[in-house]
Image (spheres, rainbow, N blue to C red):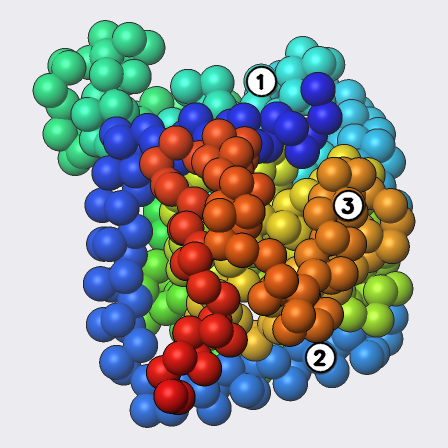
Amino acid sequence: MSKAHKFTQAAETIAFDKKHRNTIKFNISRYDTAVSKGMAKYNNIEKAKDCAATIKQDVLQNWEKYLLQFEEKITARGVEVLWAKDAAEATTFIEKILTENNAKLLVKSKSMTTEEIELNATAEKIGCESVETDLGEFIVQLAGEKPYHIVTPAMHKSKGDIAKLFNEKFNTAIDSTPEEMTEYVRGVLRKKYTSAQVGVTGANFLIADIGGISVTENEGNGIMSTSFPKVHIVLAGIEKVIPKMSQLGLFYPLLAVHGTGQQITAYNTIFTGGRQESEVDGPEKMVVILLDNGRTNVFADDEAYKSLACIRCGACLNGCPVYKTIGGYTYDTTYSGPIGSVLTPFLRGFNDFSHLSFASTLCGKCVEVCPVKIPLTDILLANRRKSVEQNLRPVSEKILMRGFKLISSNRIGFDIFPGILKNSVTYPLNFIGWGPKRTMPRFSNQSFSQQFKNKQK
């Protein structure tokens, strides 16, 4: 079964799952309320977004310069920088580091880039336990699932779902409160932090002028994951670079307000290296793996390259009516929603994932909420055109579109066929792909031209 067919089947199933819809509706409604309050603190949010977009576009025009500057600055403090062309090479690097350090346990802060290369599976394959320390990630890992959302990994679960999961796995009370479950996880993770040989983080931003890694999070798990282990591994996409540390004053609030509605995230840490001679704590060694894995394919495209400005706030997912209807798992990708639909065909191939660019109403909500003003709908349309040009669309679609072009290219084409004939052609669509909850609109017996002429009399 093709990826496109699986997507269609999964979408049809989840779209009518009332429990799922209600959970997502509740969780996103809380997000919307928080974001509205957060946005109210801005005097001119559009100006802030314009500034951020300009900086990110400058990065893409001078990408090599800023990445090399970052590498030069951070290696001067003893940090090893490795360049990984794809997931396989990044995996090889990580396996080598874990083996050399005889790692039996690693703790990992929230990172979608590590999900992209399936780091947990890599670690476990060589006998190293990998523990997610972000609460949402901890929950989905415990459930044997992948993150549902790039910012809110367990968005699809209610507090009752999580209490039931904890009861099954830890024998905690079935009616545990969120506070009680959080306290329990905190106790579990404290032992993991102090026992781990390796800590892993991603990077929200790579700061070129100081050679720094910026990690922003709300639970302190990023700091804990790097304070006790002897080795700190950073896995970062090469698009995360920004020119100057001073620009964080712009990006931190934008990321926070679009991601969670906060004025600023609770913990914002900048790592510039392992433990220095004058310091008493921190990792003995720090390794930064800069990951391409298809990003240069995106950059090579004259239209899609603008999507590399993304700061992974998740706002486009929360605003997208398609995402809110079919959920995160239907996409079957690391990055879902509008930004995932744009990126994934380039990261994982148009042959398998071109259909995602059609999973959009093109309503423009994703463009409206994007903090760096990525023209997502324009890129989705461009991806659709590329899919057609590569002959990746169904033959039946081509025939239908050619027929529609023939009829619609001239007003006579619409007028010549009576309403009864039009209805006989469109009626079967009620049962083929249109869905059981909708009815195909019926054509009038008279064409629009005829009705218009009659009214003019």
- Measure the alpha-carbon separation of dots 2 and 1: 39 Å
Type of amino acid at the residue the image marks with label 2: Gln
Residue that badge 2 annotates:
57
In the image, residue 73 sits, relative to residue 439, either above or below, namely below
Type of amino acid at the residue the image marks with label 1: Glu
Residue 199 appears at what percent x and percent y?
A: 58, 36
User: Is residue 375 in sight in this rendering?
Assistant: yes
Specify whether 10 is left or right of 120: left
The front one of 184 and 296 is 296
Residue that badge 1 annotates:
129
In primary-sequence order, the first of circles 2 and 1 is 2
In the image, residue 108 sits, relative to residue 359, either above or below, namely above
Please say if the residues under marks 2 and 1 sit with CB atoms less than 8 Å apart. Answer: no
What residue lies at 77% left-to-right and 54% top-to-bottom?
402
Tell me which corner region of the image, top left, top right, bottom left or bottom right, holds residue 77: bottom right
What residue lies at 65% left-to-right and 16% top-to-bottom?
124
Specify whether 19 is left or right of 448: left
Q: Residues within 10 Å of mark 2 (few under 14, many from 20)?
A: some
In primary-sequence order, the first of circles 2 and 3 is 2
What residue lies at 54% left-to-right and 63% top-to-bottom?
362
Nearest-to-viewer mark from 2 and 1: 2
The front one of 307 and 88 is 307
Nearest-to-viewer mark from 2 and 3: 3
Residue that badge 3 annotates:
399
Residue 430 appears at what percent x and percent y?
A: 46, 36
Nearest-to-viewer mark from 3 and 1: 3
